[in-house]
Structures are given as structure tokens and as C-alpha cells.
Amino acid sequence: MISVRALEKSYQDLKVLRGVDFEVARGSIFALLGSNGAGKTTVVRILSTLLTADAGSAGVNGFDVATQAARVRESISLTGQFAAVDEILTGRENLALVARLRHLKDPGKIADDLLERFSLTDAGGRRVATYSGGMRRRLDIAMSLIGDPPVIFLDEPTTGLDPEARIEVWQAVRELAARGTTVLLTTQYLDEAEQLADRIAILHEGRIIVNGTLTELKQLLPPAKVEYVEKQPTLEDVFLTLVGKDKR
Ligand SMILES: Nc1ncnc2c1ncn2[C@@H]1O[C@H](COP(=O)(O)OP(=O)(O)OP(=O)(O)O)[C@@H](O)[C@H]1O
Ligand SMILES: [Mg+2]
């Protein structure tokens, strides 16, 4: 569904992508992992036709991002690193607005269905300015699903969210993939990739240095030495137990 070959991109003297290659299978969740400044957003911007590459090629849904940009744009939606919701409108109005911009029939019903799917029905009539970070993120993802694009890009979907809100977003992403949507997400959280992704690629110094399933990545290191230790709960376990939500 997504295919990237020998992609290169520089900003002035800064070589950010130095030959990036990967493929994403239809209906799967692919995580692009990398530190701050690794070039994750740059890859996403090239794949979503917002930026042109200096060299190499990329295809989305069978269309070339450079020569068939309009067809690519019809196939995708992008949830950027920073939420793109309108603060002054209500959640329902934000959704209905996007549905109208996409020339869809019955924007009100589309909005109500998505509010329900993302557990925002009660908040739907309130201005987004009053939403928590997790609610904004969920609304942002809901907005990007309008029109049922086969491919969705999520650039750091859970950065800045608390553990509960992250789990809600993860659940929404899993449901998307279960419905057949192909998801490419970027993250700097290892546990997020571990929880969600069918395949994980690590972008480092301009190249993909590893790409595989979690099991494959774990096999890259020698088998763990058996040690007998008391298993201590992580702070996340404690937090989630106290606030009343288990990890899965
Ligand atoms: N328009 C631009 N002009 C100049 N440099 C840029 C531009 N956009 C990005 N860069 C630089 O390119 C590098 C990669 O940026 P990019 O945003 O792709 O990284 P990222 O992996 O998404 O990082 P983060 O995790 O912080 O979001 C960074 O060093 C950044 O400063
Ligand atoms: Mg980024």
C-alpha cells in the first residue's frame, strides 16, 4: 500500500533522508520510530505530497507521490503532529465541516457516528477549546477518517497525552486497522510501537537501520540471560491501576 525507495531529502546543507526504503502492507500498522529530528515528519510530508523529495520515489495506494499527487491525496488522510481542530467550533461542527468540505451527503449523521465511535458523544456539543488533550487528539483522528481513506498517516499521535488518553488513541488506531485501513504512524515511544505495530522501522541518521516485526527485532539481540528477580510494577502499572484502567 505504501512503497518507499531510496528517498533522499535535504534542507539546505542538512541531509535529513539519505536513502530511505520500506514497504507497508495493506491493512497493517507500520511504526516509524526515531529520535527528535530523525526525519519522521519529513517522510510523512513527502508521502502526503506536502513536500517533494530530492531523489528516490514513493508510492501510496499504487500512485506515485511526485507524478500523481492528486490521486495520492484522494487516497490518504494526515493527522499532523499538532492537532488541527478548530477551537471555536464544537466537536460536532468540526466533523460536519470536514464532511461538507469533502462533499459528502448528510454531514450531521457522519459527525454523530464518529462522535460515538470515539466516545465523544457527550462532548460533541461543546467548543473544542474546553476539550482535554486526549479528546482533541481523538477528534483530530476522527476528522481524518471522514471519507474513509484507505491510508492514514498519524504523526506522533500520542505525544503529550497521559497514559489513559494514549490507550484510548491506541484502541482507535487498532480499530482502524481492523477495518482494513493501512496506518503509518511515527512515534518516539518504544512502547507505542511495541503495542500497536505489525512492523517497526527505526529511522536513524537518514536511513532505516532495522525493519521487522517485534519478534524479529527482539531476535537481533542475544537471548536474555535468565536471572531471578522480583518483578516490580512499573510506574505506568501503578498509575493505571490507581486511576482504574488496565493496560489492554
Ligand atoms: N523546513 C525546514 N527547513 C529546515 N530544516 C528543517 C525543515 N524541516 C525540518 N528540518 C530539520 O530536519 C530535521 C528532521 O526534521 P523532522 O521534522 O522530519 O524530524 P522528526 O523526526 O519528525 O522530529 P520530531 O520527533 O522532533 O518531530 C530536523 O533537524 C529539522 O530541524
Ligand atoms: Mg516530527
Image (cartoon, rainbow, N blue to C red):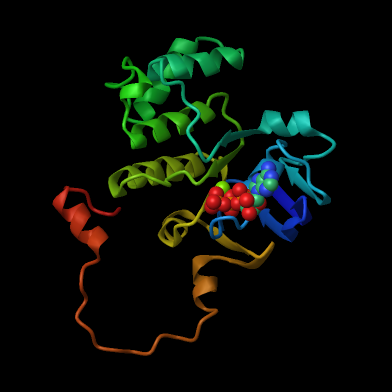
Q: Within the image, what quadrant is residue 36 found in? A: bottom right
Q: Residue furthest front?
A: 13
Question: In the image, residue 237 lies at what x, y percent?
Answer: 23, 60
Question: x and y percent of residue 18 in the render?
Answer: 75, 61
Side of 17 where 125 appears, left or right = left
Could you tell me residue 148's position as x and y percent?
A: 57, 29
User: Compared to 245, does 108 lie above or below?
Assistant: above
Residue drawn at 41 percent across, 35 percent down: 137
Q: Is residue 28 visible?
A: no
Please tell me which residue is depicted at 31% across the width and 17% down the height of the picture. Answer: 126
Q: From this viewpoint, is residue 177 visible?
A: yes
Q: Nearer the viewer, residue 81 or 139?
A: 81
Nearest the camera: 7 or 220?
A: 7
Who's the residue at 21% across and 76% down the image?
A: 231
Residue 190 falls in which quadrant of the image?
bottom left
> Residue 75: x, y in percent?
67, 33
In the rendered image of this protein, does residue 187 appear above or below residue 153?
A: below
Specify the farthest residue to the left.
242
Q: Is residue 100 left or right of residue 43?
A: left
Q: How many marks?
A: 0
| Residue at image location 19% in from the left, 59% down from the top | 238
User: Residue 133, located in which quarter of the rendered image?
Assistant: top left
